[in-house]
Amino acid sequence: MSARLSQFREYRERMNERILAAKNLPINRFFTLDTKAYEDGALDAKTKEFAGLAASLVLRCDDCIAYHVIRCKELGASNDELFEIFNVGLIVGGSIVIPHLRRAVELLDEIDAAT
C-alpha cells in the first residue's frame, strides 16, 4: 500500500473515530445514514459506490473521490468500469472535473501498483 493511501486511510479512520466519540446525535446519525446508503439493497454496493464516485467527481471533492475509488476497487471494480464512471462524472461536471480526474487516476495507479 502506498504511503499516500495509508495516510488517507489512517487520517480518515482517526478523524471519524474522533468525530463519533463526541457523541453528537445528529452527526452520528448522518454518519450512519451515509454508511447504510452504500449497503446492498435493490442496487448492489458496487453500483452505489459508482454513483457516489460520479457524484463526487461532479462535486469536486477529492477526499470523497478517493474514498469511492478505494471502495470500488475493494468491491472488485475493474479499471475499465472505473474509467466509464470517470467519463460520466466528466460529462456531467464538465472540464472543471479534469484536475480531480487526474488525482483519481493517480490514486488508481497507486492502488494497482500496491496489489
Image (spheres, grey):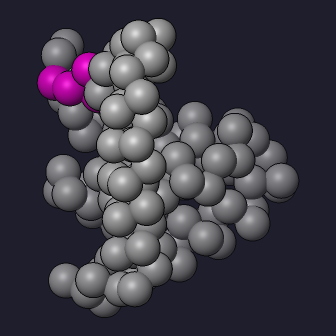
Question: Percent from the top left, x then y, of residue 105?
Answer: 52, 72
The answer to which of 36 and 14 lies nearer the viewer is 14
- Residue span colored magenta: 36-40
Q: From the image, which quarter does the N terminus lie in?
A: bottom left
Question: Percent from the top left, x then y, of residue 89?
Answer: 62, 44
Question: Percent from the top left, x then y, of residue 74?
Answer: 20, 57
Q: Give the prevailing secondary structure in the magenta stretch.
A: loop
Query: Would residue 48 appear left or right of 76 to someone viewing this image?
Result: right
Q: Find out whether residue 44 is within the magenta segment.
A: no
Query: Would residue 115 appear left or right of 112 to someone viewing this image?
Result: left
Q: Is residue 15 visible?
A: yes
What residue lies at 40% left-to-right and 43% top-to-bottom? 18
> 25 above or below 50?
above
Q: Find out whether residue 37 is within the magenta segment.
A: yes
> 42 above or below 96?
above
Q: Is residue 30 visible?
A: no
